[in-house]
């Protein structure tokens, strides 16, 4: 694999123009869910457009260890032979989730009500991430879960008879919401989760596609325990979060436009579009005919052109809807005229890295005036980037964000520790080069 080994780095030559059209790989959130829901469904699930990134492959391997039959006739096509809600078997070994927070947290909800014990582990970054946010509500349901000072390894003593809860989420988190709903499928009674602000709703949509009745009332989503899932077909759209790097690249350097095809535009994911538009970006969204099937995800082609951006105060309501896109948004902000301020983004400190600190550090290296705030970042934009060496802290999105910055740099940018780009965006280097980024992996 071209991007393996912790010594992997990118070298990005300054300048360049982006053009043409491209399709980024499948959605990570949707690929994880399609595998997991397929595994606990009855009958076969056929997934097309599957993201063959390291994170989703960790989910795939964990399901195999749990006894789920999985075939991959092609890299992006997966057939899952579901074992039903009660058909998983004891894994015998700790389940390694790699870098994937989504995998670990959703598996907690899936495994807490099983008749066997399991242990969840991950890589260095995942072993530092908070898991109590999921363990706490599951314990209220009667689950027996232990963490190590709030972090992995997560030890689950399977407890088949959970009880439903009514749970107000302390932070907007699709992972916590999903874990509680998955446990709720095996609990006695109706489990309700209330969100302080909308988070991505792929779980709700996809459970409906698998035949589960999901009740939504205002900010509350509920499932009745004991419902069965029926295998189905899932067509995974291209990942908006991967497209995001090219949306910003287009704003910086698409003199004649750049077209991104078949992008998932679920409104709980597209906060970045609003933010870039508020900055003055020229972006056109050509929505595809909406798929009428229950649980369908909206898809669009998106065209972006080089734009004169201006700094903004990011509306707090958009923060959860753009949570994974802030690294590359900060690159756009650094090039926008004037000041940009993001607050209410404390969650960025507990992602694959502390993304507020990592971005502030990298922007400082490139000569951009910024101030790291407890829950956000202030940036004075408009003076371009210099060159320098950036620490990605092993975080895929930090690495890709700074690769995009090369388009507006005056000297070479070196980005260290980029192997984890393969967790979410296998083939990034090739696609980025085909679009016009002058990037190589020495
Ligand atoms: C995800 C939810 C988000 C997001 C993550 C994927 C998901 O995390 O940051 O990359 O697939 O449910 P939170 O649930 O912590 O907000």
Image: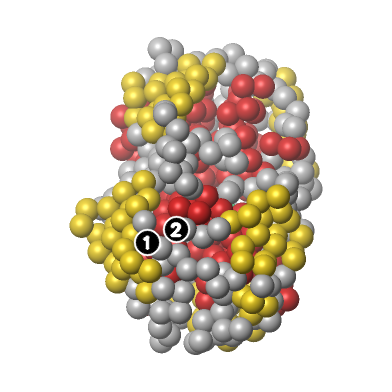
Q: Is residue 133 visible?
A: yes
Task: Write down the quadrant of residue 300 in the picture.
Answer: top left
Give 182 or 381, whichever is nearer the viewer.
Answer: 182
Compared to 420, does 69 lie above or below? below
Is 70 positioned to the left or the right of 407 in the image? Answer: left
Q: Which mark is residue 231?
A: 1
Q: Which mark is residue 91?
A: none
Provide residue 133's location: percent of width, then percent of height: 69, 66
Compared to 339, does 157 lie above or below? below
Task: Write down the quadrant of residue 158 in the picture.
Answer: bottom right
Q: Earlier in the sequence, mark 2 or mark 1?
A: 2
Give 15 or 339, whichever is nearer the viewer.
Answer: 339
Give 243 or 168, whichever is nearer the viewer.
Answer: 168
Provide residue 11's location: percent of width, then percent of height: 40, 38
Compared to 224, does 272 lie above or below? above
- The residue to which callout 2 is attached is 210
């Amino acid at each position: 694999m071209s991007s393996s080994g912790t010594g992997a780095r990118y070298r990005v030559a300054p300048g360049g123009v982006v053009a043409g059209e491209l399709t980024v790989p499948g959605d990570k959130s949707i690929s994880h869910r399609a595998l997991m829901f397929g595994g606990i469904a009855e009958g076969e699930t056929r997934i097309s457009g599957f993201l063959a990134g390291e994170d989703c492959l960790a989910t795939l391997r964990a399901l195999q260890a749990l006894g789920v039959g999985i075939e991959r006739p092609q890299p992006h096509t997966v057939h899952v032979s579901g074992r039903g809600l009660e058909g998983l078997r004891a894994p015998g070994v700790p389940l390694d989730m790699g870098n994937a927070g989504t995998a670990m947290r959703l598996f907690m909800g899936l495994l807490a009500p099983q008749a066997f014990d399991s242990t969840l582990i991950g890589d260095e970054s995942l072993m530092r991430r908070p898991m109590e946010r999921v363990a706490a509500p599951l314990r209220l349901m009667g689950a027996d879960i232990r963490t190590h000072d709030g972090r992995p390894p997560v030890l689950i003593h399977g407890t088949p008879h959970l009880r439903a809860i009514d749970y107000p989420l302390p932070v907007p988190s699709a992972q916590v919401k999903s874990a509680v709903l998955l446990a709720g499928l095996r609990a006695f009674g109706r489990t309700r989760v209330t969100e302080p602000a909308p988070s991505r709703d792929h779980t709700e949509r996809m459970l409906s596609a698998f035949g589960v009745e999901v009740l939504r009332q205002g900010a509350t989503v509920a499932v009745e325990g004991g419902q069965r899932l029926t295998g189905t077909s899932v067509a995974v759209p291209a990942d908006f979060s991967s497209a995001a790097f090219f949306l910003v690249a287009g704003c910086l350097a698409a003199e004649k436009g750049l077209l991104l095809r078949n992008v998932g535009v679920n409104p709980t994911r597209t906060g970045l579009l609003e933010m870039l538009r508020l900055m003055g970006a020229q972006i056109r969204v050509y929505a595809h005919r909406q798929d009428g099937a229950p649980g369908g995800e909206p898809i669009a082609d998106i065209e972006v052109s080089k734009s004169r951006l201006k700094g903004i105060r990011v509306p707090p309501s958009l923060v959860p809807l753009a949570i994974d896109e802030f690294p590359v948004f900060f690159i756009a902000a650094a090039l926008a005229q004037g000041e940009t301020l993001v607050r209410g983004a404390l969650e960025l400190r507990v992602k694959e890295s502390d993304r507020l600190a990592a971005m502030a550090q990298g922007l400082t290296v490139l000569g951009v005036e910024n101030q790291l705030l407890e829950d956000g970042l202030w940036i004075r934009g408009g003076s371009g980037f210099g060159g320098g060496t950036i620490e990605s802290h092993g975080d895929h999105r930090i690495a890709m964000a700074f690769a995009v910055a090369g388009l507006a740099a005056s000297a070479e940018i070196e980005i260290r520790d980029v192997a984890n780009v393969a967790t979410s965006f296998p083939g990034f280097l090739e696609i980025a080069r085909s679009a016009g980024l002058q990037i190589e992996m020495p």
